[in-house]
Image: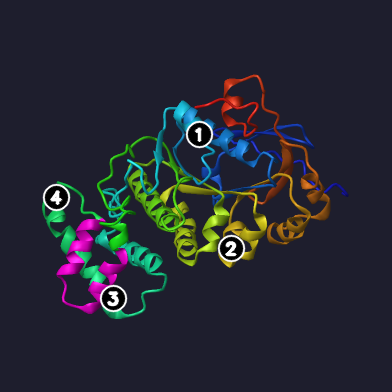
C-alpha cells in the first residue's frame, strides 16, 4: 500500500526496448503507435543520457523498418548515426550546396481538396518570420494567396508534372502585382530569394525519399535559422502527409526543442503540428536539457502535459517541482530522477509511471555511434 509504484508491465509485442523496470525487473517494450497520443519527450540534465536514449530508439525504429524517422538536429548530434544506418543527412547553411524548396507540396494530401490552403498559411507564417511582425491586413493575406495560386496554376494544370514552383517564382510574381503591399513583401523576402540566404528558394537537390533523414542546421546563421526551422517543419509535414497516404508511420525527433520556444512563429507552427500529429500517423519527440525554458512557454507546457510518452533522466532541482506538477509525479517517484545515475530515470507512459534502468553494452559499435562522450565515440 505504501509503495509509490504499482507492479505494472510495459510490454507491447511490437514495441521498442527501453530497459528494465527497476521495481519488478521486467523488460520494458513500448510501441508508441498504441498509445492515445504517441508524442513524447526526453528530458534530462547535460550528461544524463537523453541524447543516447533518443538515438537508441531511433536506431531500433530504423533497423526494424518500423517507420520513417526524421530528425531536426541543431547540434550535429545524430549525423554519424544516420549516415551509418544508411540515412540521408541534409546539411543546411547559407553557403551549403544542399537546398530544400520551401514551396514543395506533397501529392499525398488527398484529404485536402485545395492543397494550396495549408501552403498559403505556411507562406504567411514564413513572411511574418522574415518581416518580424504578424501579417494583419487583409490586403497582405490576399496578395500572398493570389500570388501562390498564380505560380502553381500551370503546375496543377499539367497534373503535378514539371518543376515545382519555388520562392523565387513567388518573389517574381509579387513584383508583377500593382499593390504596394506586394512590393513590401517582395522587398522583405529578397534576401531569402535572390540574396545570399537563398538556401530555400531553389529546387530541392537532396534525397528526401529516404526512410531516415537528419536535417543538420548547426552551421546555420542566426538570421537564417528561424526561417530554416519553419521550412524544415513544413517539409516534415509534407512527408507526414505522403506517409499517411501510403499507411506508414512517421517519427519526428527534435533535438534542443527549447530553441523553438524563443520564437513566437516557430512555436505556434510546431504546436499546431504537435496537436494534429496523431491524426496523420505521426509521433513527435522533443529532446531538451533546458527544461526550464520548455516549462516557461505556455505552448511547451501544453505539449508536455498532452504527451503520453516522457522519459525523465536526472533533473535539476529547479525543474523537478515543475515537472511533478505538470506530469503528476509524487515526491517519492521524483527520487528516481534526483542525482540519478546515467541510464536510469522515470518512464511516464500512457498514465503509468515506472522507474527504469537501461545499461547499453559499451563494447558494441552501436554504442560508440550513440555515445556523446568524445573519448568513446567513433566518426560516422
Please report whichever mark, 1 or 4, sits nearer to the chain's N-terminal start: 1
Please report whichever mark, 3 or 1, sits nearer to the chain's N-terminal start: 1
> Residue 177, image x and y in percent?
16, 72
Residue placed at 77% from the left, 36% from the top?
22
Image position of 284 (left or right of 191): right
Residue under numbered circle 2: 302
Please report whichever mark, 2 or 1, sits nearer to the chain's N-terminal start: 1
Labels 1 & 4 near each other (Cβ < 8 A):
no
**Spatial distance from mark 2 to mark 3, Cα to Cα?**
31 Å
Magenta stretch: helix, strand or loop mostly: helix
> Residue 316, image x and y in percent?
75, 52
Residue under numbered circle 3: 140
Residue 204 in the image: above or below residue 156 = above
Residue under numbered circle 1: 61
**Spatial distance from mark 3 to mark 1, Cα to Cα?**
44 Å
Please report whichever mark, 4 or 2, sits nearer to the chain's N-terminal start: 4
> Residue 159, image x and y in percent?
14, 50
Labels 3 & 4 near each other (Cβ < 8 A):
no
Amino acid at each position: 500500500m505504501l509503495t509509490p509504484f504499482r507492479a505494472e508491465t510495459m510490454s507491447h509485442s511490437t514495441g521498442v526496448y527501453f530497459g528494465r523496470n527497476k521495481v519488478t525487473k521486467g523488460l520494458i517494450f513500448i510501441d508508441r503507435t498504441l498509445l492515445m497520443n504517441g508524442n513524447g519527450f526526453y528530458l534530462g540534465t547535460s550528461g544524463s543520457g537523453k541524447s543516447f536514449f533518443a538515438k537508441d530508439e531511433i536506431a531500433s525504429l530504423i533497423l526494424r523498418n518500423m517507420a520513417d524517422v526524421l530528425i531536426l538536429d541543431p547540434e550535429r548530434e545524430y549525423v554519424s548515426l544516420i549516415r551509418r544506418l544508411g540515412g540521408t543527412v541534409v546539411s543546411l547553411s547559407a553557403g551549403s550546396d544542399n537546398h530544400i524548396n520551401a514551396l514543395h507540396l506533397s501529392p499525398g494530401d488527398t484529404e485536402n481538396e485545395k492543397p494550396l490552403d495549408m501552403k498559403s498559411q505556411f507562406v504567411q507564417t514564413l513572411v511574418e518570420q522574415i518581416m518580424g511582425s504578424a501579417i494583419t491586413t487583409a490586403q497582405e493575406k490576399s496578395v500572398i494567396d493570389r500570388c501562390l495560386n498564380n505560380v502553381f496554376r500551370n503546375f496543377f494544370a499539367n497534373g503535378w508534372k514539371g518543376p515545382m514552383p519555388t520562392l523565387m517564382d513567388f518573389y517574381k510574381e509579387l513584383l508583377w502585382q500593382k499593390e504596394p503591399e506586394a512590393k513590401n513583401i517582395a522587398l522583405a523576402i529578397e534576401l531569402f530569394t535572390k540574396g545570399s540566404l537563398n538556401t530555400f528558394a531553389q529546387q530541392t537537390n537532396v534525397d528526401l525519399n529516404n526512410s531516415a533523414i537528419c536535417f543538420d542546421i548547426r552551421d546555420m546563421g542566426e538570421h537564417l535559422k528561424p526561417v530554416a526551422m519553419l521550412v524544415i517543419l513544413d517539409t516534415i509535414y509534407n512527408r507526414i502527409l505522403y506517409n499517411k497516404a501510403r499507411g506508414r508511420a512517421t517519427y519526428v525527433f527534435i533535438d534542443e526543442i527549447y530553441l523553438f520556444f524563443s520564437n513566437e512563429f516557430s512555436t505556434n507552427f510546431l504546436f499546431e503540428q504537435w496537436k494534429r500529429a496523431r491524426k496523420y500517423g505521426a509521433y513527435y519527440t522533443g529532446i531538451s536539457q533546458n527544461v526550464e525554458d520548455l516549462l516557461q512557454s505556455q505552448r511547451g507546457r501544453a505539449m508536455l502535459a498532452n504527451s503520453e510518452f516522457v522519459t525523465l533522466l536526472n533533473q535539476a532541482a529547479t525543474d523537478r517541482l515543475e515537472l511533478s506538477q505538470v506530469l503528476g509525479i509524487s515526491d517519492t517517484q521524483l527520487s528516481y530522477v534526483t542525482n540519478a545515475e546515467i541510464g536510469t530515470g522515470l518512464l511516464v507512459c500512457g498514465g503509468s509511471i515506472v522507474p527504469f534502468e537501461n545499461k547499453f553494452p559499451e563494447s558494441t559499435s552501436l554504442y560508440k555511434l550513440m555515445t556523446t562522450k568524445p573519448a568513446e565515440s567513433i566518426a560516422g
